[in-house]
Amino acid sequence: MKILIADDEPHNRLLMEKILGPYGTCDLTVTGEEAVDACELALTDQEPYDLICLDIMMPEMDGQEALTRIRDLERTHGIDESHEAVIFMVTALNTEEQVVKAFFHGGCTDYIAKPVQRGALLEKLHQYSLLPRADQ
Ligand SMILES: [Mg+2]
């Protein structure tokens, strides 16, 4: 599984890499713009990300804008909705309004609340079939 983690806080970036690292290759970016660039490169190489975790609050380009641009890039590269990346918005408690916006306007798959909990994140991977369940 190919994973992209975008978060401006080093601690969160590394925490998510530690949780997700055993399940795939993780690329890390600090800004939304870098995340969009990484996605574009991956799409051009025909090796798109399976999972993208976007922090909502990032300087310059935030997760919301990055989400919209990444979905646009997928369309530009001929990826239809059934093959698009699973995108989790990573949110602090005070960004509830942003989460709603991400769902209804941006096309995110789901969200994860900070502080990110290993069990909750892995449960989401199962939920979106990125990891098989033990009983399947
Ligand atoms: Mg942030």
Image: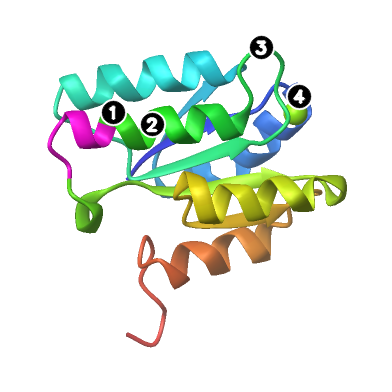
Tell me which residue sits at (41%, 80%) in the image. Answer: 134
In the image, what residue type sits under mark 1? Leu
Neighbours of disc 3 within 10 Å: few (<14), some (14-19), many (20+): few
Question: Taking 67 as reference, is 50 above or below it?
Answer: below
- Tell me if mark 4 has few (under 14), some (14-19) or many (20+) residues whose alpha carbon lies within 10 angstroms of its own: few
- Rendered image quadrant of residue 92: top right
Looking at mark 4, is its residue's CB closer than 8 Å to ligand 1? yes
107 in magenta: no
Q: Which residues are magenta?
A: 74-79
Q: Which residue is mark 1?
A: 73
Marks 3 and 1, Cα distance to the nearest angstrom? 19 Å
Q: Of label 3 and label 1, which has the lower sequence position?
A: 3
Q: Are marks 2 and 1 in contact (CB under 8 Å)?
A: yes
> The residue tagged with tag 4: helix, strand or loop?
loop
Image quadrant of residue 48? top left
- Tell me, for residue 70, which label it has, or none: 2
Horizontal and vertical percent for residue 40?
29, 20
Residue at point 22%, 58% (across, down): 82
Q: Quadrant of the C terminus?
A: bottom left
Question: Any mark on residue 60, and which?
Answer: 3
**Quarter the N terminus occupies:** top left
